[in-house]
Amino acid sequence: MLYIFPHNLALGIEGLAMKTLPFDGNVESKAMKVGHVIDHLVDALGGEPACTLRRAVILADIDEHPGTTQAGIIQRLRADKSALNRDIEWLVDYGCLRRRPGADGREINLFTEGYSKRHLDLALSYFNNSHNSLKNFLIRYINLFGQHRPTLRDAKIVAAVGDKDPTNRQQVFQTLYNGPQTTDNRAINNLIDLGILERKGT
Amino acid sequence: MSEAIGLSGDFAPAFASLCASVGGGDFGVSLSLDSGAGSFDVGGGGEGGAAPAMEP
């Protein structure tokens, strides 16, 4: 079921991934909060749950440093250059970032686009509006997956399972993003293969 | 399709530690995006706590 809340309507965005209750620190469990942060990030990243958490870190970094260059991101995040190139291309293609030539005509400055920034702000509200805290949280989340590069879908599945442990696939699907169920099922199976999730007797 | 699933025993404590960091404010330490940290190694942190420094 898709819920539309006033703060979402105010944004004028259709097809939102955020379909859970809005931020309420008194009601949400910790794992539920993680799920809500991921929902907002899906909205910030073109509504694409297949996007990696890594790209969310990069988006948050650019939002924190408007007009930054690729070199600046590499320096701050100690990110691999060729991988960062691909990530930035993806973020531009999905309308999350805007490029603008710098004053010297050679440098390219990067800015977050309006809709992306608005949804990122909602995710930041869970971290006292600290970009650094959001980035560190996401990097720690990425590191939990070891060599696997987690997507936002992976992160949401883990949060949904963590919130209702033990649960079942159907309940997890209901928290996800209306994509093909085969894709969601494959993602759960992959997380089981990785040893992150496990089948439990009832 | 109705089988029960949950977080694995190894992963659950690391995820709980991660959850505790939500709403904890600024860690004051920036982690490296391509540090290649080990699986399930979330380290310290917690609500308001300091995040672990990682190798670049």
Image: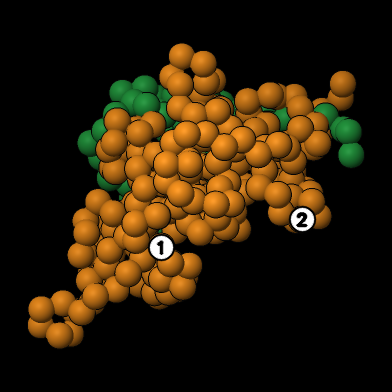
Chain colours: A orange, B green
Q: Amino acid at mark 1?
A: Cys
Percent across and percent down for residue A65 are 21, 56
Res B54 visible:
no
Q: Is residue B13 above or below residue A130?
A: above
From the top left corner, tell me how far across and down residue A199 is, in percent: 81, 34
Q: Nearer the viewer, residue A199 or A124?
A: A124
- Up the image or down, B38 lies above or below B18; here it is below
The image quadrant that residue B21 belongs to is top left
Q: Chain under label 2?
A: A
Amino acid type indicated by mark 2: Pro
- List x then y, in percent, for residue A101: 20, 79
Cα separation between marks 1 and 2: 24 Å
Residue sitting at x 63%, y 25%: A163
Q: Residue at x 74, y 45 (%)?
A: A188
Point 76% across, 27% down: residue: A167
The one nearer the camera, A185 or A194, is A185
Identify the residue under disc 2: A180
Marks 1 and 2 close (CB-CB < 8 Å):
no
Q: Earlier in the sequence, mark 1 or mark 2?
A: 1
Whether labels 1 and 2 belong to a single chain: the reply is yes
How would you rate the neighbour count of disc 1 (Cα within 10 Å): few for under 14, some for 14-19, many for 20 or more?
many
> Which quarter of the picture shows residue B43?
top left
Which residue bears the numbered disc 1?
A: A96
* Foreground of the two, A81 or A109: A109
Please give the chain letter of the residue carrying mark 1: A
Q: Position of residue A60 (x, y in %)?
A: 34, 51
